[in-house]
Image (spheres, rainbow, N blue to C red):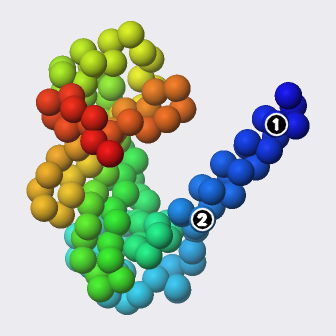
């Protein structure tokens, strides 16, 4: 049993590493850095690769935030940490029997707003009406 658990943890770590990987700021394209600076000035930022895009992690008004940019420097989505109590009522109602440990508000470039709730170590994605989004 311990071997299976160890293998699952190792596989999960490897899988996660393939989706996001920390990178040095010098490896981030200039267009991406310029787009970030235009929005946030000299805010301290850490960079990761998310598939083929660049994710900027930073603090915004005392909350953890991130933004995903294309290689061309286009903002694809932003995510800001919110209190669990700030989730829409429809989501809280849907998850009322479960413990939500973290929450975030995601805004896509199209203006679409989604909410993320961490339950049992998994990130679940919802629209404002409480519908699960894949």
Q: Is residue 72 above or below residue 76?
A: below
Q: Quadrant of residue 18?
A: bottom right
Image coordinates of residue 70 in percent, x first then y, are 32, 77
* Mark identifier at residue 104: none
Which residue occupies 23% across, 43% down?
114
Q: Quadrant of residue 45?
A: bottom left
Q: Return the residue found at the far top.
A: 97
Where does residue 31 sit, x and y in percent of width and height? 32, 87
Closer to us: 48 or 19? 19
Q: Earlier in the sequence, mark 2 or mark 1?
A: 1
Can you say whether 13 is above or below 114 in the image? below
Q: Secondary structure at mark 2?
A: helix
Residue 15 vertical placement versus 47 (above, below):
above
| Residue with the most extreme bottom position | 30
Callout in the foreground (2, 1): 1
Few, some or many C-alpha atoms within 10 Å of disc 1 (few <14, some 14-19, many ≥20)? few
The one of 22 and 96 positioned closer to us in this rendering:
96
Q: Nearer the viewer, residue 62 or 123?
A: 123
Is 15 drawn above or below residue 103 in the view shown?
below
Q: Which residue is disc 1 drawn over?
A: 4
> Which residue corresponds to the image point at 27% horizontal and 61% vertical from the top-left?
77
Q: Give residue 2's position: percent from left, percent from top.
A: 87, 31
Query: Along the horizontal axis of the image, is 122 left or right of 86?
Result: right
Disc number at residue 18?
2
Quadrant for the C terminus in the image: top left
Asked if residue 48 lies left or right of residue 14, the reply is left
Residue 47 visible in the displayed image: no
- Residue at the (26%, 48%) spot, across then down: 106
Q: Residue at coordinates 88% horizontally, 37% vertically from top-left?
A: 3
Disc 2 versus disc 1: distance between alpha carbons? 21 Å
Residue 109, position as x, y percentages in the image: 18, 63
């Amino acid at each position: 049993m311990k071997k299976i658990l160890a293998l699952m943890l190792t596989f999960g770590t490897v899988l996660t590493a393939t989706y996001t990987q920390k990178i040095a700021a010098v490896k981030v394209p200039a267009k991406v850095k310029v787009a970030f600076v235009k929005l946030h000035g000299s805010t301290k930022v850490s960079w990761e690769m998310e598939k083929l895009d660049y994710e900027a992690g930073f603090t915004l008004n005392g909350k953890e935030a991130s933004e995903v940019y294309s290689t061309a420097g286009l903002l694809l989505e932003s995510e800001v940490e919110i209190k669990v109590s700030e989730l829409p009522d429809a989501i809280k109602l849907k998850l009322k029997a479960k413990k939500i440990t973290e929450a975030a508000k995601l805004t896509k470039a199209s203006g679409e707003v989604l909410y993320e709730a961490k339950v049992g170590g998994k990130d679940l994605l919802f629209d404002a009406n409480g519908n699960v989004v894949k």
